Image (spheres, coloured by chain):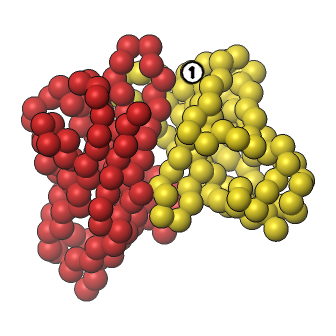
Amino acid sequence: NAGVTQTPKFQVLKTGQSMTLQCAQDMNHEYMSWYRQDPGMGLRLIHYSVGAGITDQGEVPNGYNVSRSTTEDFPLRLLSAAPSQTSVYFCASSYNGGGYEQYFGPGTRLTVT
Amino acid sequence: AQTVTQSQPEMSVQEAETVTLSCTYDTSESNYYLFWYKQPPSRQMILVIRQEAYKQQNATENRFSVNFQKAAKSFSLKISDSQLGDTAMYFCAFMKRTTGTASKLTFGTGTRLQVTL
């Protein structure tokens, strides 16, 4: 199993550009989520999904869109990048409910200039 | 809403010594899970230990153990016989246990642990 994969590992964008961060898992997990990690703030939940076709907002959803057309994939879209979106982004997956371990991808470091 | 507080931004411990990382949380839920995750310089998030709130017994995983005080809403992590490989950022996290609720994690701000020779 590859676990949770994320692409790209690094990305630099100019303000106003859009892009999609890719996330995929091969563990047949129902639950997938996106977090951003900023210095001194821990990880904050952006969006999450409990299954294909079902998504919901987390703590900091503004400026981001998600969709879940398959169990395996959960892309995160930045609509119009802003410097405040400079961060490290993590995708995670797990079985839903029951306090199961969440498996994290390796992260994407995004810089918006 | 739940909040998780880690009041120690940085800590240092000598190799082979014991160190305790603090975590407190605030919730109105009675059933939940608590986790400690480790993030080494590689940036990968790794689960260290998990505690179910309805279990009174403290969880242990080899050199890692927790002191779970439900009434005080405290969940500290003890690392025994510290090793250089324990150098990392440690995050405390909370998850509700309600049936049908999504497995959302709420993280603390982290404690950076440095293990020295």
Q: Give the answer, above or below, for where B22 lies relative to B105.
A: below
Q: Is residue A35 visible?
A: yes
- Looking at the rendering, in which quadrant would you find the C terminus of chain A? bottom right
Write down the quadrant of residue B39 in the picture: bottom left
* Chain for disc number 1: A
Q: Which residue is mark 1?
A: A50
Q: Give the answer, above or below, for where B27 lies relative to B41.
A: above
Label 1 element class: strand
Q: Could you say where residue A35 lies in the image, as x and y percent from the top left? A: 58, 45
Q: Is residue B85 visible?
A: no
Circle 1 residues within 10 Å: few <14, some 14–19, many ≥20: many
What color is chain A drawn in? yellow
Nearer the observer, B44 or B36: B36
Q: Give the answer, above or below, for where B106 lies relative to A113.
A: above
* Residue type marked 1: Val
- Looking at the rendering, in which quadrant would you find the N terminus of chain A? top right
| Residue found 28% across the figure and 82% down from its top | B116
Going by the image, does A79 lie left or right of B4? Answer: right
